[in-house]
């Protein structure tokens, strides 16, 4: 079950990154591409945090053994995900979404 759930998380994050790349490379609307980037960062962060939690649960206390690879990877990824202004990216994305004249499902099409 955990492998299936991790696969769902990874695929969802990949789709966000793919959509972000396509929007950024299209050059059509820079402002909406930036909004998509902010949302993608959040989606990838959530997927990674959920994956970390699943790995910790699967490994139990072994996930926290400081001499093990799991602990090092968990700490490094957790630190990397804690970018500056975590709430600011969501607030900026929300402001941009609310200012859009199009429904959310049509912004990046």
Image (tube, grey):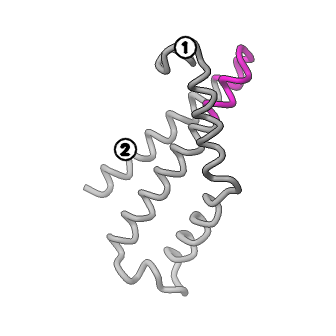
Q: Main secondary structure of the magenta part?
A: helix
Task: State the image coordinates of residue 50 (x, y, percent, origin top left).
Answer: 42, 57
**Residue 90 or residue 7, whichever sits in front:** 90
Q: Residue at (57%, 18%) from the top-left corner?
A: 108
Residue 96 quadrant: top right
Q: Which mark is residue 52?
A: none
Q: Nearer the viewer, mark 2 or mark 1?
A: 1
Of the image marks 2 and 1, the number of the one nearer the N terminus: 2
Q: Residues within 10 Å of mark 1 (few under 14, many from 20)?
A: few
Task: Please state if 62 lies on the left or on the right of 100 as rendered.
Answer: left
Task: Please state if 4 lies on the left or on the right of 53 as rendered.
Answer: left
Task: State the image coordinates of residue 52 (x, y, percent, origin top left).
Answer: 45, 63
| Above or below 98: residue 40 | below
Q: Which residues are magenta?
A: 23-37
Q: Label 2: state its secondary structure.
A: helix
Q: Which mark is residue 8?
A: 2
Q: Label 1: state its secondary structure.
A: loop
Residue 25 quadrant: top right
Residue 8 quadrant: top left
Task: State the image coordinates of residue 72 (x, y, percent, origin top left).
Answer: 57, 75
């Amino acid at each position: 079950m955990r492998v299936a759930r991790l696969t769902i998380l990874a695929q969802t994050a990949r789709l966000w990154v793919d959509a972000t790349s396509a929007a950024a490379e299209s050059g059509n609307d820079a402002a909406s591409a930036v909004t998509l980037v902010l949302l993608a960062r959040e989606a990838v962060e959530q997927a990674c945090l959920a994956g970390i939690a699943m790995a910790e649960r699967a490994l139990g206390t072994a996930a926290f053994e400081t001499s093990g690879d799991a602990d090092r990877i968990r700490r490094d990824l957790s630190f990397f995900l804690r970018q500056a202004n975590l709430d600011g990216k969501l607030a900026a994305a929300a402001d941009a979404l609310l200012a859009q004249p199009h429904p959310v499902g049509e912004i990046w099409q």
